[in-house]
Amino acid sequence: MSAAYLRPDFDVVTRWVAHGASVLDLGCGDGTLLDRLTRERGVRGYGVEIADAGVLASLRRGLDVVQADIDGGLHLFGDGAFDIVILSQTLQATRHTEALVNEVLRVGASAIVTLPNFGHWQVRWQLGVGGRMPVSKRLPYQWYDTPNVHFSTVRDFDVFCAEKGIVVERRAVLAHGREITLLPNLRGETAVFQIRRPRAAAR
């Protein structure tokens, strides 16, 4: 299966990032997305990754990467240091979700967050009918070795943003690599949000 199918959210993120933007990619993995943004959008980017293998792979691509645990905060970066902070399939694997989102919106004018949708109908089917935690190509982990700490749906993140006073600038929900609008919480596999603080509250 092609990488394009496995990570169609990369296409959305790349479209949404402005040319020449300053970008912080949190949980950048092997640097695939940050490398693409550098080549295709001319961004000035930094990555943060905790895993040794990811840091080494990113450095081999010639990227600027810091090895750190983002659950401990983003104290290395000043207020408004970046145009965009990216959390690509990262937020659900962190422990202090609200605190991290607050930090992300402190250091970035906006943030792009991509999340697996645990409200997808196949997830509901496997849990409701099979009685077991779902395993699929999109969610390939068993319950005992998954890196995911928080399980949320598209609707959950919408409600979270509304309750915390976070503005959702735009949202895309993907199924089979394509954007969908009909029944997104039921049919969507991955959701991509661009969020920011209200203008009056921005620092």
Image: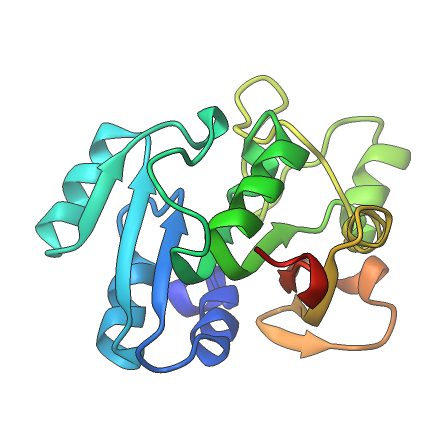
Q: Which of 134 and 180 is in front in this view?
A: 180
The residue located at (84%, 27%) in the rendering is: 131
The residue located at (62%, 77%) in the rendering is: 178
The answer, for residue 129, to whether it is visible in the render is: no
Looking at the rendered image, the quarter that the N terminus falls into is: bottom left
Q: Nearer the viewer, residue 65 or 155?
A: 65
Above-or-below relation of 106 to 174: above
Q: Which of 80 and 163 is in front in this view?
A: 80
User: Which colouring convention does the figure follow?
Assistant: rainbow
Above-or-below relation of 107 to 42: above
Q: Is residue 64 left or right of residue 203?
A: left
Looking at the picture, how far across and down is residue 31, in whole percent? 27, 53
Looking at the picture, how far across and down is residue 183, in whole percent? 87, 68
The answer, for residue 177, to whether it is visible in the render is: yes
Q: In this view, does 199 lie to the left or right of 14?
A: right
The residue located at (40%, 33%) in the rendering is: 75
Q: Nearer the viewer, residue 161 or 6?
A: 161
Above-or-below relation of 132 to 191: above
Q: Is residue 32 left or right of residue 96?
A: left
Looking at the picture, how far across and down is residue 150, in whole percent? 68, 31
Q: How many labels does the image show?
A: 0
The residue located at (35%, 47%) in the rendering is: 28
Looking at the picture, how far across and down is residue 72, in whole percent? 46, 24
Q: State the image quarter where residue 176 is shown.
A: bottom right
Looking at the rendered image, the quarter that the C terminus falls into is: bottom right
